[in-house]
Image (tube, coloured by chain):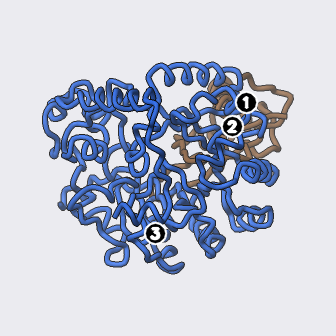
Chain colours: A blue, B brown
């Protein structure tokens, strides 16, 4: 462990999930299915301490997320604390409940950037996916964010229900004056894992949508940056998840659990440490959870002897667990994985579901459904 | 993008230039991203404060570092900075 201490890179990215409360019900939410089980929330002083400790270690990018972070009444105070510490603060919000007055308050407190999510390019579909009438308000918020001098990032999560709207989504982002557009193909964790058969587009749909997005990228070059998060189920190699386990990213959940990635709470028997019990430095350097998949020693074949292991770190641990039952296995997205067939199977299951005439309904992310799933 | 010698060089209001003590580096921060700079790039960007044209910026750096012939290198870096939106001219 002592050797590790010296070679550990410090956290650069801190994701502060301030709350699991959210007025929206997106069926691809990355929060755990059983989020209603975790009722306690860190106090304002706890959050301030966590921000201070992580900043001292070298964290510089800070995301205020959730749930919906705007439901925390101390958000402005936390933003101000973060600014005093020198963080670059990102507010990752649905925009729901964001007023011009709040936008100004946050700006004065030192917030650097607001990312607004929009679920679709049409009101009907946006409000259906969000489970809440919110389309008009989101558009208003996006314009206000821009008006008050923030870099404006629109985030649209892409899945089978909205992928056909790609041209309209791109046009909407341009019309709203977005500086960045994040087209995030759904990552299948949490609620998205549960709803995968209904959300996963076909390969043809992906290819069509990606070609449209890439062409648009050139059209708006110099005006709007487009981040395209690729759907890894249709790749041959896994993503370099989290830039390697516990090398860069640190997530703190509403109740204070520290995670090397925001889905790691779902890994079994993992015993992730809580900031109520340990300092951020102890957690980062010494905890079993953070050291578990550091480096390459934990790897099985074919990762262990693979010449690409330093490029993708064996892919995503949570995906390996969700799809193979073994968190140490090669991410099955990799074509070298002996269990790569599970990806082909889930693609074909989703396709059959899309073609069937009586598809089961989406399970929306809300308290009632969460309690039923515990 | 090419640098216009007639226009002032200004660091983008949508980015932040900041010294990071732990890394001992100057970095550019922007939504969900960060670029680490080497010392010469950092020195160039610090001078893009809306008061200098290209020639004045080159002269200032050549004086500070007691050298000459920096125009080509500085211009090449500023073009990269313009392309990335780190600086603006207008």
Q: Secondary structure at mark 2?
A: loop
Callout count: 3
Instruction: From the viewer's perspective, tell me whether residue A15 is left or right of residue A267.
Output: right
The answer as to whether the residues below labels 3 and 1 share one chain is yes
Eye-nearest disc, 3 or 2: 2
Q: Which mark is residue A171?
A: 1
Instruction: From the viewer's perspective, tell me whether residue A170 is left or right of residue A187.
Output: right
Seen at 26% across and 24% down, the residue is A335
Does the residue at mark 2 contact the one at mark 1 (Cβ under 8 Å)? yes
Q: Position of residue A271 (x, y in %)?
A: 24, 66
Q: Earlier in the sequence, mark 3 or mark 2?
A: 2
Seen at 80% across and 34% down, the residue is B89
Q: From what the image shows, is residue A251 above or below residue A187? A: below
Q: What chain does badge 2 belong to?
A: A
Question: Which residue in the structure is indicated by mark 3?
Answer: A254
Q: Position of residue A83 (x, y in %)?
A: 62, 65
Q: From what the image shows, is residue A371 above or below residue A224? A: below
Q: What chain does badge 3 belong to?
A: A
Q: From what the image shows, is residue A222 above or below residue B61? A: above
Instruction: From the viewer's perspective, tell me whether residue A243 is left or right of residue B50.
Output: left
> From the image, which quarter does the C terminus of chain A lie in?
bottom left
Seen at 72% across and 51% down, the residue is A138
Q: Earlier in the sequence, mark 3 or mark 1?
A: 1
CA gap, disc 2 to disc 1? Answer: 9 Å
Q: Earlier in the sequence, mark 2 or mark 1?
A: 2
Q: Position of residue B60 (x, y in %)?
A: 72, 40
């Amino acid at each position: 462990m002592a050797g590790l201490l010296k070679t550990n890179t410090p956290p650069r990215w801190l994701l502060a999930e301030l709350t699991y409360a959210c007025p929206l019900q997106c069926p691809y939410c990355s929060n755990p299915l059983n989020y209603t089980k975790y009722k306690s929330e860190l106090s304002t002083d706890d959050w301030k301490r966590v921000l201070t400790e992580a900043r001292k270690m070298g964290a510089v990018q800070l995301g205020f997320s959730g749930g919906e972070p705007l439901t925390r009444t101390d958000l402005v105070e936390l933003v101000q604390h973060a600014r005093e510490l020198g963080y670059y603060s990102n507010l990752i919000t649905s925009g729901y409940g964001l007023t011009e007055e709040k936008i100004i308050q946050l700006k004065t407190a030192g917030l650097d950037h607001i990312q607004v999510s929009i679920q679709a390019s049409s009101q009907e579909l946006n409000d259906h996916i969000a489970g809440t009438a919110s389309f008009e308000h989101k558009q208003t918020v996006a314009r206000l964010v821009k008006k008050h001098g923030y870099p404006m990032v629109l985030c649209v999560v892409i899945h089978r229900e909205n992928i056909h709207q790609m041209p309209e989504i791109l046009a909407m982002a341009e019309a709203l004056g977005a500086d960045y557009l994040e087209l995030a193909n759904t990552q299948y964790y949490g609620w998205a894992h549960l709803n995968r058969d209904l959300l996963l587009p076909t390969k043809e749909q992906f290819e069509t949508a990606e070609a449209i997005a890439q062409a648009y990228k050139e059209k708006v070059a110099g005006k709007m940056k487009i981040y395209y998060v690729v759907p890894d189920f249709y790749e041959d190699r896994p993503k370099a998840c989290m830039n390697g386990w516990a090398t860069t990213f640190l997530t703190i959940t509403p109740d204070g659990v520290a995670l090397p990635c925001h889905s790691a709470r779902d890994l079994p028997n993992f015993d992730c440490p809580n900031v109520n019990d340990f300092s951020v430095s102890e957690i980062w350097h010494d905890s079993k959870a953070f050291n578990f998949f550091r480096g390459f020693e934990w790897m099985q074949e074919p990762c262990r002897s693979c010449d690409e292991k330093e490029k993708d770190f064996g892919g995503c641990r949570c995906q390996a667990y969700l799809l193979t039952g073994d968190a140490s296995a090669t991410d099955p997205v990799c074509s070298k994985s002996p269990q790569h067939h599970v990806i082909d199977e889930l693609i074909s299951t989703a396709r059959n579901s899309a073609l069937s005439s009586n598809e089961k309904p989406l399970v929306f992310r809300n308290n009632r459904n969460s309690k039923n799933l515990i | 993008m090419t640098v216009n010698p007639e226009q002032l060089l200004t660091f983008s209001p949508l980015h932040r230039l900041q010294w990071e003590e732990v890394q001992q580096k100057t970095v550019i921060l922007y939504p969900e991203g960060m670029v680490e700079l080497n010392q010469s790039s950092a020195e160039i960007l610090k001078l893009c404060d809306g008061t200098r044209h290209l020639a004045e910026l080159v002269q200032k750096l050549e004086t500070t570092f007691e050298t000459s012939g920096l125009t080509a290198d500085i211009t090449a870096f500023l073009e990269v900075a313009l392309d990335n939106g780190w600086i603006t001219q207008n």
